Image (tube, rainbow, N blue to C red):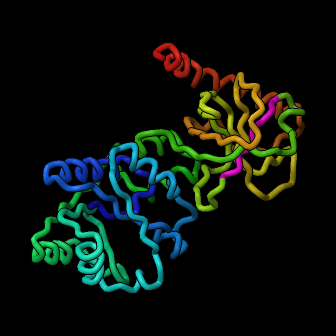
Amino acid sequence: MAIGAFDGFHLGHQHVIATLISSAEKASLSATIYTFRQNPKLSSRSIQGVLTTNSERVDYAGKVGIENIVLEDFSTHFQGMPPEAFIRDIVLGRLNAKVVIVGRDFRYGRARAGDIELMSRILGDSGCKLIVIDPVTIDGEVCSSSLIRSLVTEGSVERAARFLGRPYSIEGVIVTGNRIGGRLGFPTANIEVPDPVKLLPGNGVYAVRALVDGIAANGVCNIGVRPTMTTASRRTVEVHLLDFDRQVYGHLASIEFVARLRPEIHFASSAALVKQIAQDVARTRALLEPALKGELDTE
């Protein structure tokens, strides 16, 4: 069993999971991830959102071959549990763990008082094994969910992808908007992200890859408040899909953020905005179309 928040399923988490699967196979045990239905840092309001929703974490776990994932409720009772009780009652008692895998900085129990030394001792007394995983470093920095959340929040999606091992993505339903993009000559799909705790990249314009109804398309995505055309304060996610003319209202879309093109800014006129959008489209084509052509050629 591997224990942790697993927000992002980044390269550090993937190292933990690889160890989990290998250890389970060697000992002829089932592989289980033990995590939380709500990220503990959301309860303390120390973060504004999560990199992966519950459904995304379950999906990622299945893709890498994890047989079981336990989503624990981070309730008041659970938060007040002494560290010893967490190990004895949940890890050993309820889940019957034989091998436990955690990161070196793992803390647990009331006031985060439990450490790996205590866990190693209690597990050892019960004939069980603790495996402690050292952090993964990339470009001299420790790969962590907190770092990736900071990068996504500031719009540094290229650097975030280095630590995630893949582009950062969101998923949402395409809903009807105010059709401003269409009037400007660049119709957009308005994405309504259903989970309110899903972290959105910082306001700006991005080159993205989209998947709608199983069809891949490149696009230009604007996240923000559209200061040139509206006075709204609510952030929106709009994607202009390149060479895509289907009616897809009500359909699910997955958006991968490949590169940040520029910040969201106020333009003096709609004509100036249209000129800039055309430049954004040209840059996106130059960035993404060679890659998309390569993918299609290999199918």
Front one among 231 and 265: 231
**Quadrant of residue 35 in the image?**
bottom left
User: Residue 289: percent from the left, percent from the top?
Assistant: 59, 20
Residue at the image position 25 percent from the left and 83 percent from the top: 84
Left or right: 201, with 241 as reference point? left
Residue 34 seen? yes
Image position of 160 (left or right of 102): right
Residue closest to the eye, 87 or 113:
87
The N terminus: image quadrant: bottom left
| Total numbered labels | 0
Q: Quadrant of residue 115?
A: bottom left
Q: Nearer the viewer, residue 197 or 75?
A: 75
Residue 186 picture location, percent across and down: 80, 30
Residue 113 location (% of width, % of height): 30, 81
Q: Residue at x 87, y 39 (%)?
A: 180
- Which residue appears at 65% of the width and 25% of the height? 283
- Residue 137 at x, y = what percent? 31, 48
Q: Horizontal placement of 208 versus 84: left or right?
A: right
Residue 51 visible within the image: no
Instruction: Reply yes or no: does residue 220 show up in magenta.
Output: no
Residue at (79% x, 58% y) in the render? 233
Q: Which residues are magenta?
A: 186-193
- Residue 191: within the magenta? yes
